[in-house]
Image: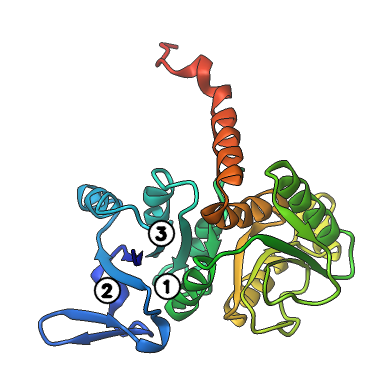
Amino acid sequence: MPKKVLIAFGSPSDIKNMSGLQESEGKIYSLSTELTLPDTEYYLSVASAHRTPDIVEQHRDYCNWDGIVAGAGMCNALKDAYLSHADIAMVLVALPMDDKTTRGVSSMLSSSETPPGYPIGMVGLGNLPAAVRFVNYALQPHKKVSLHTRGTTVEPDKAMDDAAKMLKRLGVEYQFPTQIEPDTLNLLAYDNPLTPSITDVPIICTYNMPVELRRDGRFDLAWLGLYLDGVNKHDNYVHVGVANGGNLGFYAAKIVARHDLDVRGRIADLIVGGREKYNDFRAVRQL
């Protein structure tokens, strides 16, 4: 049975002149052939999580998607509409889009920052080819994870330690090799986004703000420009939040879970456990 991937956009304007997407007469769209795999079917959705939520729901439930690319500007609520009802092992990649007000900053931050246990991978601004290539890569069987750090502070090591703890908790085999392992899922924690890419192999990343950009316990906004530049610079980097080793490991585990039922079961248990703290608040209370 072929894998099924949904490429979803929040507005018709998002698909105009989109790299990797070709339009022919009659509003018929297709992906560039260099982005497609013979064992995978690709579908297009254009529906807004705010303006047409009913259509988003219909497209979400069209089938059991193996992977989804969710592209939208501003707060990118589209990725949340799919994330909240996603299968445990469905690969979800957020595609931030440009906007006239913030030039894509709001979409990029909202696309990657999610609560613990609900990770999303994010590619660079409007980089559909990168998103599709990563989904294609993630849908292949992966059993082992390799952990890497690059930086001059202890922060990358801490994030990777958190990733390792999450992988161990979910029963995923991992290692700390000295170089990139092409046959494994590679995770990276780094603190200099402008450093050249270490490989052409897809990398799942988290970015740690350098210590020198912390001022009296507050964030120096200089880190924001560095982070956004770094995200857009590396086509093979998929980012899972800022300084979030736990979600980094969780995202990798979900990919492994596609072909490992034991890991899938542990993820399900962890998600259920995370909901228990809301049990006392199931009913609305008058104040």
Nearest to N terminus: mark 2 or mark 1: 2
- The dot on residue 81 is none
Q: The C terminus is located in which quarter?
A: top left
- Image depth: mark 1 or mark 3 in front: 3
Residue 126 visible here: no
Q: Is residue 157 above or below residue 177?
A: above
Which image quadrant for residue 68? bottom left
Question: Residue 277 placed where, x, y %?
Answer: 58, 23
Between residue 76 and residue 65, name the one nearer to us.
65
Residue pointed to by mark 3 = 66
Q: Is residue 28 left or right of residue 230?
A: left
Nearest to N terminus: mark 3 or mark 2: 2
Disc 2 + disc 1, Cβ < 8 Å? no
- The dot on residue 98 is 1
Residue pointed to by mark 2 = 13
* Residue at position x 72%, y 46% in the image: 166
Amino acid at circle 1: Asp
C-alpha distance separating marks 3 and 2: 26 Å
Q: Is residue 146 left or right of residue 267?
A: right
